[in-house]
Image (cartoon, rainbow, N blue to C red):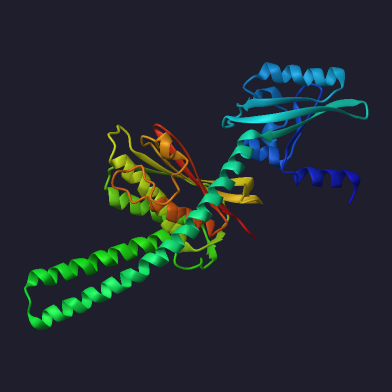
Amino acid sequence: MTSDQLHRLLLDNLNTAVLLIDQSLLIDYINPAAEALLQAGSARLRGSAVSDLFDDAETARQTLREALEFGRALTLRHEFLRGLGVESSQVDYTVTPIRIGTDQWVLMEMQPIDRILRINREEALLSVHDTSRSLIRGLAHEIKNPLGGIRGAAQLLAQEISESEIDSETSELCQIITTETDRLRNLVDRLLGPSHLPQFARINIHEVAEHVATLIEVEVQGGLTVVRDYDPSIPDLSGDREQLIQAVLNVARNAMQVMLESNLTQRRLTFKTRIQRNFTIAGQHHKTLCRLDIIDTGPGISEDIKERIFFPMISGRSEGTGLGLTIAQSAINLHQGIIECDSEPGSTRFSIYLPIKA
């Protein structure tokens, strides 16, 4: 391997976004991490003005010129990325002048602030989620044992009542006890999440999304519009089909119910799939993931529960159990993935990230 090939290999495998800029302040090289951050390929970005990537284009130009003129590295913080179809995000970036032969270049390194905040928020979420699951498992064990005794006693009592021909009203009360005990046991089971480990097999995410989208269409009978925005190039991933369908259905049905219960002029539920590159989940870096977005046009999630939306018994609906999203997050966690939420009035997006492994 030549020195140039080694340098290119190192740049291509960095998690930091790196751009090489010529004296005309045009992009000459962009590594895969920068492509992922800017949501555009090298072919599209090469030859374009780097200042066009920033909300404050003039400051970017002045910084690059100063680095070239005075030969020193400069760092700008909390700059907004915009343009070229890039979603607004904040970055810190450093520009370093370098000389290659007689030519002058600028090396730009970008560090997304949003990513750091997201990782910190995710680590806190996973920590609380693990703690709550441990607590729930302990409580569930303590609750299920006496429930079994209550149900057994109610059945014996009902049998004695039947044999002694006591009034039917007492028999009905025994039946109510049995039914409500079963309902409480089912609630506890739902709190515990999936009852078995995933049975992994190769599966296409669009099979899962389409199954759920069809179920929603049948359920609402025209009450809202279901939109598909799929990337057919996404390869198969390893997962448990039933658990993934249940997780996606919980998220989609929650969005559907919120929209149907709200006074909206437009009800739209979108299933969108994309490739996500260079993403960190629970401290593990993944080069390639599948991202499934479930986007609704509902009223949004209130600020007071937004940070706790995946916790058990937390619901934005008056009739909600607060378990659907918790169960969905647990199932996706078992696939080494995560669900994230971004919400504002008129648009709520749940993003499901699942690693794609060869």
Location of residue 165 by image quarter: bottom left
> How many marks overall?
0
Residue 300 rendering spot, x and y as whole percentages: 39, 36
Q: Residue pushed farthest right?
A: 101
Where residue 154 appears, as percent x and y from the top left, is: 22, 73
Towards the viewer: 242 or 337: 337
Residue pictured at 42% horizontal, 62% vertical: 139
Which of 221/144 is in front? 144
Q: Where 60 sits versus 310, above or below? A: above
Q: In the visual, does 208 lie left or right of 335? A: left
Residue 227: name its quadrant: top left
Is residue 356 shown above or below 70?
A: below
Q: Quadrant of the C terminus?
A: bottom right
Q: Residue at x 31, y 45 (%)?
A: 257
Question: With 358 as the anchor, is 238 left or right in this view?
Answer: left
Q: Is residue 105 left or right of residue 122?
A: right
Q: Is residue 41 visible?
A: no
- Residue at the extreme bottom of the image, as rendered: 163
Q: What is the x, y in percent for residue 39? A: 62, 37
Q: Residue at x 53, y 60 (%)?
A: 334
Identify which residue, 32 or 354, lies in the foreground.
354
Residue 144: which quarter of the image? Answer: bottom left
Residue sitting at 54 percent across and 66 percent down?
Answer: 200
Residue 339 placement (x, y as % from top left): 50, 48
Q: Is residue 354 visible?
A: yes
Position of residue 345 in the picture relative to residue 132 (left or right): left
Question: Depth check: 66 or 304 in front?
Answer: 304
